[in-house]
Amino acid sequence: MGTTLKTFDGRGAACQPLPSRGTIFGQSEGMRRLWQVAEKVAGASVPILIVGEKGTGKEVFARFIHSCSPGSNAPFLKWSLPVPDGRPSDEFGFRLEPEGLGEHEEAGGNGNSRRRLCTLFVDEASELEPERQLELLQLIQGSRSLISSDGNSIPVSLQVIATSTRDLEQEAAAGNFRADLFSALSAVTLRLPPLRERREDIPQLADYFWRIYSERFGRQPVPPDSHVVERLQQHRWPGNVRELENVMKRYVVLGADGINGTGPADQAQRTFAFAPSSGRSVSLKQVSREAAQALERKIILRTLQETQWNRRRTARALNISYRALLYKIKAAGLLPAESKIGARHRELLKTSDTAA
């Protein structure tokens, strides 16, 4: 039996349904070339490295590759990076239930043994500690076995897909990343362009997020018109597709107010509005944080009002945990100042939350 590998969480990732292929790759020439390459390498079972700025959709791209692979119906597993404070890392093993893979097997090299086929997704490989880098290298090379929750060894054929926002070649040259692991991971390297380099894809992406969150929030907002789309295409999108998703989420909730600050004119107005007239310095980070908190408070309050202050329904509508919502409500001072309710009504709120 091989060595037990201690650094994985083998639960299948709880992922939202993938967007359509047309939505993921859009109309830009660079993305269309990536589409062609991705379909070719999906069935090759070679390690793949996806590089790109934060928010460019690297995990979605990895899931698309998984969907095109021979093991598309098998689990899409995610490497578990953080370890809870105060608990040794060797308490965390790769736990993959045998019944979860029973239908996704492939014949071994001798025709008798069978190996489970699945995809292992390693997000931001550059952040792996040295010992984890070694374990991943050994896993790729096949010198370590995986174990199930009952302690039995399960041989698995893995399609390893890793992502990085950093240049791993430079990191390896600087001694911050194993050169042999970089060589193994970069058998195929795919570079996702930032959203500012694929502006022709923004209308389709915006429409996709508008439809998704309209359905999720149970709303029927006005579709983004040509004026809205033009403002979206003029924005630089430092947060890439993830930022666009958040903007469209706000648009669904707030309408036109949700896209304020996405055009060049809006950015200039905010610059002048926050510029200190007395010559004193101003913290751009603080200003941005306060603006984001104010908008978040507005969205939460409006959703609470529409759900009649049912916090569980509000949490589901905003796609956050109930506990996170309670924290945000308290931090924003929404209770009791905004609701103007007494202790008896708060008890009724708790009962309503439980019933929901």
Image: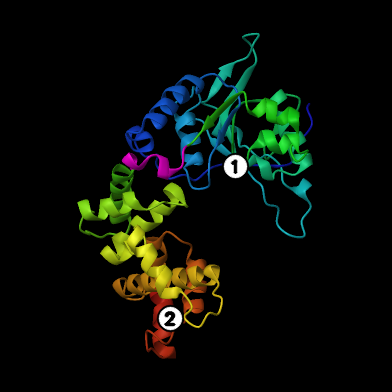
Percent position of residue 27, x then y:
32, 33
Can the viewer see residue 226 in this picture? Answer: yes
Compared with 41, 166 (above or below) is below
Three-letter amino acid code at the position of disc 2: Leu
Compared with 124, 1 (above or below) is above
* Magenta residue check for 113: no
Q: Is residue 60 left or right of residue 262?
A: right
* Residue situated in front as seen by the camera: 283 or 184: 283
In the picture, which quadrant includes the C terminus? bottom left
Pointer 2: what residue?
334
Can the viewer see residue 153 in this picture? Answer: no
* Residue density around tag 2, few if under 14, some if 14–19, many if 20 or more, within 10 Å: some
Compared with 74, 310 (above or below) is below
* Residue situated in front as seen by the camera: 237 or 352: 237
* Residue situated in front as seen by the camera: 100 or 224: 224
Q: What separation in Å lies between label 2 and label 1 (alpha carbons)?
A: 36 Å
Q: Quadrant of residue 185?
A: top right
> Is disc 1 placed on a helix, strand or loop?
loop
* Residue density around tag 1, few if under 14, some if 14–19, many if 20 or more, within 10 Å: many
Secondary structure character of the magenta stretch overall = helix
In the picture, which quadrant includes the N terminus? top right
What residue do we see at 72% from left, 46% from top? Answer: 92
Point out the residue furthest to the bottom here: 342
> Is disc 2 placed on a helix, strand or loop?
loop
Image: magenta residue range: 193-201
What residue do we see at 77% from left, 60% from top? Answer: 86
Q: Which mark is residue 123?
A: 1
Mark found first going from the N terminus, 2 or 1: 1
Pointers 2 and 1 in contact (C-beta within 8 Å): no
* Magenta residue check for 196: yes
Percent position of residue 33, x then y:
42, 25
